[in-house]
Every structure is written in C-alpha cells, then in structure tokens.
Image (cartoon, rainbow, N blue to C red):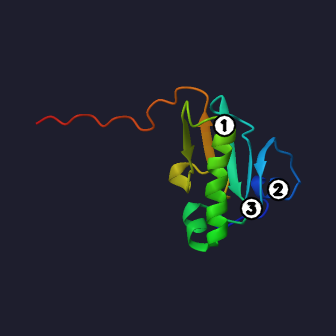
Amino acid sequence: MTYDSQNIFAKILRGELPCKKVYEDDHALAFYDIDPQTPVHVLVIPKGAYVSFDDFSERASEAEIAGWIRAVGKVARDLGLPAPGYRVIANCGADAHQEVAHLHMHLFAGTDLGRMIKPREKREG
C-alpha cells in the first residue's frame, strides 16, 4: 500500500477538512471519529505520511514514534479513560479492514467493549 497524499487524514492535517480536535502537538493530531462505533471513539494520527504501523515503525524517527505513542496515552488520560477502561486498535492492511491509508489509532471507550476475539471452540479428544 502506498501513501496517498489526498487521503482524508492528510486533508485534515493540511486544514482542508474540519475535525473535532481533541489534542494536537508537533507529532500527532487526535480527533473524534465522524462515525463513532462506541460512545467515545477518537482517532490519533501521526503528522507524518505513514501508511501503517509497520511503515511507521520502520521509517519514523525516534521522536515521531515517542511523540505519537505518548499522544495516544495523553488523549486517553485527558478523556478519563484509564479507570473504566478502553481499547486501542490500529488496523493495518486489507485483511484488517484498514479504510484510510494513513496510520491511525482508534481509542474506543464509554461502554463494555466485550471480548475482542471470540474464544476458540474447545477441541474434543
């Protein structure tokens, strides 16, 4: 997957599209998802042009990596999510149903999120 500078998150970063901003610093931007899947659904994106987590971990500087990861934690704390609990997910690639080819972390909270993956069926025998 190659980076498309016309993706929706790139346009948000350039100020061409609005967002309901939660947090911003030199390395990251966090905003509410326009189609929330849970009562709290925030996206945290790095400001660099990275397609996925593997792309980011390979090419980003140490400052970008630390800055983005710290931003995810700060947003969760600022929203009061650690005590009740929250889920952090980054979908990477087609099989994970990544919809925008710009690395982004979802923060889901505000309800019982249930199990992430169904338990495996017990084998007989």
Q: Residue at x 65, y 58 (%)?
A: 68
Mark 2 highlights which residue? 11
Check contact, mark 3 vs mark 2: CB within 8 A.
Answer: no
Image check: 29 left or right of 114? right
Q: Earlier in the sequence, mark 3 or mark 2?
A: 2
Q: Which residue lies furthest to the top in this view?
A: 111
Tag nearer the camera, 1 or 2:
1
Say few, some or many: other residues with alpha carbon within 10 Å of mark 2 (under 14 / 14 to 19 / 20 or more): few
Q: Mark 3 points at which residue?
A: 47
* Camera-nearest residue between 66 and 14: 66
Callout 3 amino acid? Lys
Depth check, front residue: 40 or 103: 40
In primary-sequence order, the first of circles 1 and 2 is 2
Element class at badge 1: strand
Q: Which of the image's four quarters has the C terminus?
A: top left
Q: Looking at the picture, tell me which residue is in the foreground, 43 or 73.
A: 73
N-term-proximal mark, 1 vs 3:
1
Q: Look at label 2 and name its amino acid.
A: Lys
The N terminus appears in which quarter of the rendering?
Answer: bottom right
Residue appearing at x 55%, y 54% in the figure: 94
Image position of 105 with respect to 86: above or below: below
Three-letter code, disc 1: His
- On the image, the x and y values in percent for residue 72 come to 64, 50
Label 3: state its secondary structure. Answer: loop
| 44 shown above or below 47 | above
What residue would you read off at disc 1? 41
Taking the spot 85% from the left edge, 59% from the top edge, the residue there is: 14
- Whether residue 124 is visible here, answered yes or no, is yes
| CA distance separating discs 1 and 3 | 19 Å
